[in-house]
Amino acid sequence: MSTSTVAPVPPGSAPSGLRGRLPTSGVPLALVSIAGLVLLLSITRVITGADDLTSSGTAGAALALAVPIGMAGLGGLWSERSGVVNIGLEGMMIMGTWGAGWAGYQWGPWTGVLVGCLFGAAGGLLHAVATVTFGVDHIVSGVAVNILGLGVTQFLSVIAFEGVKGAGESQSPPLDDVATVSLPGLRDPLLTLEKHHWFLVSDLAGIVRGLFTGVSLLTVLAVLLVVLTYFVLWRTAFGLRLRSCGESPVAAESLGVNVYLMKYVAVVASGAFAGLGGAFLAIVAGNGYREGQTGGRGYIGLAAMIFGNWRPGGLAAGAGLFGYTDSLQLRRGGESVHALLLLLGVLLVAGAVALAVRRHRIAAGVSVVVGAAALAVYIQTDVVPDDFTTMTPYVATLLVLALASQRLRMPAADGLPYRRGQGG
Amino acid sequence: MRRVTTLASALLAGALVLTACGGSSDTSSTDTTPGTGDSSSAAKSDLKVGLAYDIGGRGDQSFNDAAAAGLDKAKADLGIETKELEASNGEPESAKEERLRVLATAGYNPVIAVGFAYSGSVAKVAKEMPDTKFAIIDDAAAVGDNIANLLFASEQGSYLVGVAAALKTKTNNIGFVGGVDVPLINTFQVGFEAGVKAANPKAKVQVKYLTQPPDFSGFGDPAKGKTAAAGMFDAGADIVFQVAGGSGGGVFEAAQAAGGKAIGVDSDQYNTADPKVKDVIMTSMLKKVDVAVYDFITQVNDDKFTAGTTVYDLAKDGVGYSTSGGQIDDIKTQLEDYKAKIISGEIKVPTS
C-alpha cells in the first residue's frame, strides 16, 4: 500500500515484536512492517496451502476495495484536521456515485470523476455552511448530510434516469471504465513465478503483480492523493494553518489565520475526496451508479482514519487492512480465513509470552485464551463457514485496534464549537 | 446568535423535507404509460390495480421490471387503471404498511406487493382491509382469505441452468454467487447444484454469498460481486451463476475480464444487461414474474380470485431458461429432456 508517507506511530508505541534496534517510526517502520507481514503471510501460506493469501488476484482486489475506503478516510482526515467532525462522508460519497453515474454516461468517465468530486464537494459545502457558519453540532449536520445524500440522489434519479435506456429509478446507464496501466514486462513473468508456489518468491511475485499490473488510473490517482495530502498538510504553511484550526482555533485566530476559511476549504475538500471515492465505486468497481452501492464505506473510511491516528499513512494502512481482508473473504473466504486463524493464533500466543515477560498478567491471559481458541478452531475445521468469513474485515480491524493502537490522539479541538472572535 | 440558530434549523428542516421528496417517489401511471402499447383501444375494465415495488423499482432490469412488464401488459390488454409506488432502501416496516394502505384506501383493488420483504405488512394490512384483495410475490408466510401468494419454483429453473453449466464447463469447476444468504436465494443454489451434479458428477460448485442477513447490501454492491466472481475464476471456475440482484453486473464484468462465462437470473439478462458484457451471458434462469402478475390480474378481472399459494413452475412456464445469444443451442435438446422429466415428475428437484 501507499505507505511511503510517515506512519502515525509515536516513538515507543510500536508493537512489541518490533522493538530493539528496529526503527520505531517513519518510512523505515512501514517498510519493516510490510516485509514482516509478507514473510508471515508467506509462512502461513506454505503451511496451510491457502494459496489465495498472497495471490495477485487477492492483492489487486484488495487495492481496488481499499481505494473508496481510503478516499473517504482522506476526506475525514482533511475535515477533522481542521476541527470539523465529518460523519456525513457516507452521504457525500453517495452523491459522488450519483454524480459520476449521471455525468459519466453522457460525457465519458473522466467527466464522471470530476462531477462525482463536485457533487461530493457540494455535500461538503453544505456541511461546512451548517457547522462553520451556523455552528450546528457536527454530528447532527453530518447525519443530515447522510440522509440528504440518499434522498436527493433518489429524487434526482427519478428525474434524470427515468426512461433512459439501460437505466432506471435506482441506477444509471452503464459507464465506460477509465484506462488501466501496468508496469511493463511484468505481467506474464510474474504469473509464471506465482504459479510455482515457492516460499516467499511466489508470494512477492503475486503481490507485486496484483499491485502493479492492470491498475486503474483512478487507483493511481488515489494513491498519489494520499501522498499529496501528507505533503500539503504537513509540509506547507497552508497545511500548518489548517491543522492549527483543528488543534486550537483560538490560537490560530490570534496569529491571523482565517479559521472559517480554512475550515471551509478543508470540509469542501473532504467532500470532494469522499465524492471521488464514490466515483471510483461507480466507474471502476462497478459499472454505473446504483442505489445503495456505497454500503457504509463512508463510515468505514472514517473508522480507517481513526485507526490511522488521523495521519495519511495510518489511514492508508487501515484502508489496506480492510481491503485485504475483505478481498480474502470475498474470494476464497472459507479457505483463506481458515489459514488466517493459524496466523492469528500463533501471533496471539507469541504476544502473550511477550506480555507475560513484561508482567502484564491479565492481558497475557486473555491473549493466550483467544489465541488457543483460534488454534483449536483451526485444527478442528477445514474451512470457515460463510456466516463467519463475512465478518473478517471488521474483526481484523477491531483486533488490530485493540492490540496495537491504544494511543490514538485526535486533533485537540476536533468537533468543538468555534465562533469567530471567541478568543477575545 | 439566535438568528444564526434559526437559519440553521431552517436549513436542516429544508434538508429533511427534500429527503422526504426523494424517499417516496411515486409514479402514478394515469398520465404516463411507459412501455405500453396503445391502451385506448383496449377493452375497458373498471379494475383499479395497485402495485408496490420492492427496492429497485421500475427500471431495475430484473425482478421489479418483470412485475412492471406484467402490469403493463395487463393494462394494455384489459384497459385497467393502475397505480405504482416505489420502495426505498432501508425503509422501516411501517413505510411498507403505509404504502399498501395508501393503495387500498384509494380504492385500488387488487393490490400487488412485489417481494418477500412485504410479508409482514401484507399480513397486517390485509386483515385491516378484508374487502381488498392482495397478492404477494415470493412469499408464503402471509396467509389470509384475501391474500394470494404467488411463488416460483426457482429451484427448477436453476436446475436447468445448472445442467447447462455442467455440460458447458471445460474445467469441471463452476461458481455460484448469491447476493444475501436468505432461504429464497438458497433455493436457487440447491437447485443449481442438483442440476450440475445430475449432468456432470465430476464438476464441483464454489459457493459464495456476498453478505449475511440482516445486511442486505449484497443485492446492490457490484464491487463485491466482481471480487467474489474474480476469485472463483482465479480458482479455476469457467462459468459463474449469479443470483445477486444489482451486484450481478460485477459478476458479468469479472467473467469478461477472466474470459469466462456467466449465467443471469430473473429476466433474460442477455438483453437487459450492459451491452459491453452481454457476450459472456451464456443463458439466464428466467423467473417470469410478469406472467404471474398478468395471470393474477386477469383472474381478478374474471372474478376468479383464489386465495392461497400458486406455484409458478416449469409446467406453468413460470420459470425456465433463456436462449438469447445462441450459446446453448447445441445442448438445447438435452435441456428440454431434463425439463420434460421435471414436469413429468421423473426428476424431483430438491428445494433445501
Image (cartoon, grey):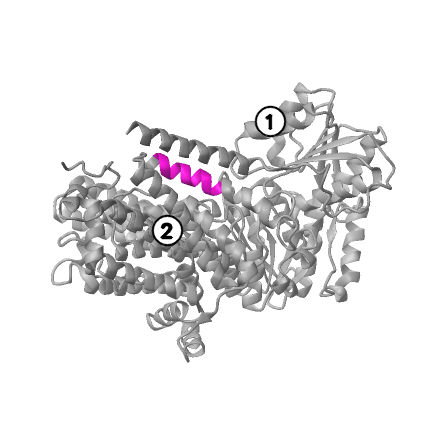
Q: Nearer the viewer, residue B330 or A120?
A: A120
User: Residue at point 56% right, 58% down?
Assistant: B251
Chain letter behind tag 1: B
Instruction: Verify whether residue A330 appears in magenta.
Output: no
Q: Which residue, as the protein is rendered here, is positioned at the far front?
A: B3
Residue range corresponding to the magenta coloring: A140-150
The reply to whether the magenta stretch includes residue A142 is yes
A197 relative to B223 in the view: left or right: left
Which labelled disc corresponds to residue A72?
2
Q: Is residue A87 visible?
A: no
Q: Quadrant of the C terminus of chain A?
A: top left
The image position of residue A16, as x and y in percent, is: 17, 53
Chain at numbered mark 2: A
Q: Is residue B93 left or right of residue A319?
A: right
Residue at mark 1: B98
Please check whether the numbered discs 2 and 1 fall on a single chain. no
- Residue at image position (68%, 59%) is B270
Pick the front one: A103 or A346: A103
Residue at disc 1, secondary structure = helix
Name the residue type under label 2: Ala
